[in-house]
Image (cartoon, grey):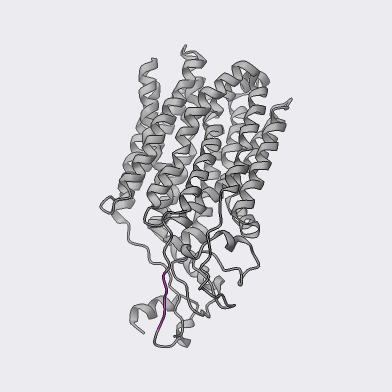
Amino acid sequence: MTSETKGKSNTMAGTAASMQSETKVRKVKAPDGGGGWIVVFAVLAFNIIFDGCCYSFGILYIKILEEFNETKSNTAWTGSLFFSTPLLLAPIAGIITRKIGSRLATMLGGLIATVGFAIGSLSNSLAMLMVFYGLVGGIGMSLPYFNSIKIVTDYFDKRLALASGIAECGAGLGTIIFGPLTEYLVSTYEWRGALFIISGIVSNIIVCGALFCPVKRNKNKTCNKNCTSHYLPCSCCFKSRYSMDVSEHSVSHVPDGCETTPETEVRCIYVSQLKNIQFLMFAISNFVMYFWNHIPYIFIVSNAVDIGISLQKASYFLSIIGFVHMFGIIGYGVLCNRKCVNRMVVYGISNGMCGVSILLVPVFQEYVPFAILSGCFGLFSAATEALLSCVLIDIVGKKAFDNFFCGLILFTEGVADLLGTPFAGFLVDNTRSYDTTFYVAGGCVTATGFLYLILSRNRTEHTDCEVTVQS
């Protein structure tokens, strides 16, 4: 046994002392294509619906303000709950997915979200709207949202950036489609009718879930009670159907008879990465980014209306954001799929420029500059959707990402989303102007760009815990 192997095995709860001098590690690669592209298409369709609902809320926001005559801060809680609940419940969504599988979990979530939207359209108070549209709708979205991120990383490895880029461009398509669509529905059927019709569109998430096809398992691989994976335990270790939705391809190290328990293995990964200063810097920066991330989507329309631009024209800003955002995600996916490109540097520069585009919104009062800034925001914010999972995997590794850190980061993003929009509304209520909110949001997001650049200069390659077994 080499000294390097000994060092790694010592982290596995002292089991190295009982190991023999030889080890076996068998690697299985992700399929990187085939049926995976069907999954990418299903995730794309889900993102069109989910992000379209999220990013078009700014149009509903104006009508809800008029309907219930509440403060901007209180009204913002409705959208904030819907944005944040899928992220806050990511760990719970992961547990449910382990029990019933990605396909069934996604379909169940689509059904819950549909019911929440439909009942929300009947709300006679802001509190009722918060509960059904914001909370129940968000709970429903948490299951497909979690699986839409997880399942792409299971199917792709070398082409992960490209596949993620294609799947996440649904955010741009959703904004392009739902911006004018929501404005038309609100103008024609009022906000209640619009929300009821949107609930019908949301029901298509059930169809998306049906396309989350389980990957064919390797029939040559036999399972035993001692087996485990670095990503997710096999069904022989835990009585679960989740392994049916996760391929052997998604396991990077498959031991042939490991004596190490899954709990010990996972603990090794978690503890080592939680102490990683690079991860901590990333988590803080990501929290700040998501705290202010939805401000342009929520307030750019109402800000434009306040300075004299019509609601119909103002809704086009969302379409501009979505159109540029879509091509930006694909562009980032293609660019960062190259080995010579430092993803963290690209991520940092993009976030910095995204902050600058927000910061400049109060400087201009005309339609054309607003449209240009909307396009800039759509382009640079695309890095978040396209590269977040890739950058996090670069820092903590695929094993830790799948087992724990994906859910942890989504949870922190949910907390940021939950608090950010109401706080921005609070600033607007107290300053009676959107300018302060855009200045503060832009400054904070720009600062995260610098933090990411600092992180890129100090980042060291992650080291995943390996399982050492007897030959």
The reply to whether residue 433 is in sight is: no
Where does the image place residue 217, in percent across and percent down from the top left? 53, 65
- Can you name the residue that lies furthest to the top here? 308
Q: Residue at x 50, y 33 (%)?
A: 174
User: Which image quadrant is residue 253 in?
Assistant: bottom left
The reply to whether residue 138 is in sight is: yes
Where does the image place residue 308, in percent across and percent down from the top left? 47, 11
First to last magenta residue range: 23-27
Residue closest to the eye, 307 or 402: 402
Residue closest to the eye, 34 or 6: 34
Where does the image place residue 274, in percent across and percent down from the top left? 46, 61
| 328 on left or right of 228 | left
Residue closest to the eye, 45 or 275: 45
User: Height in image: 218 above or below 445?
Assistant: below
In the image, is residue 410 part of the stretch drawn in magenta? no
Quarter of the picture containing the C terminus is bottom left
Q: Main secondary structure of the magenta part?
A: loop
Quarter of the picture containing the N terminus is bottom left
The mark total stands at 0
Residue closest to the eye, 463 or 446: 463
| 124 on left or right of 10 | right
User: Height in image: 327 above or below 252?
Assistant: above
Q: Residue at x 51, y 45 (%)?
A: 43
Where does the image place residue 216, in percent across and percent down from the top left? 53, 62
| 371 on left or right of 222 | left
User: Height in image: 371 above or below 326?
Assistant: above
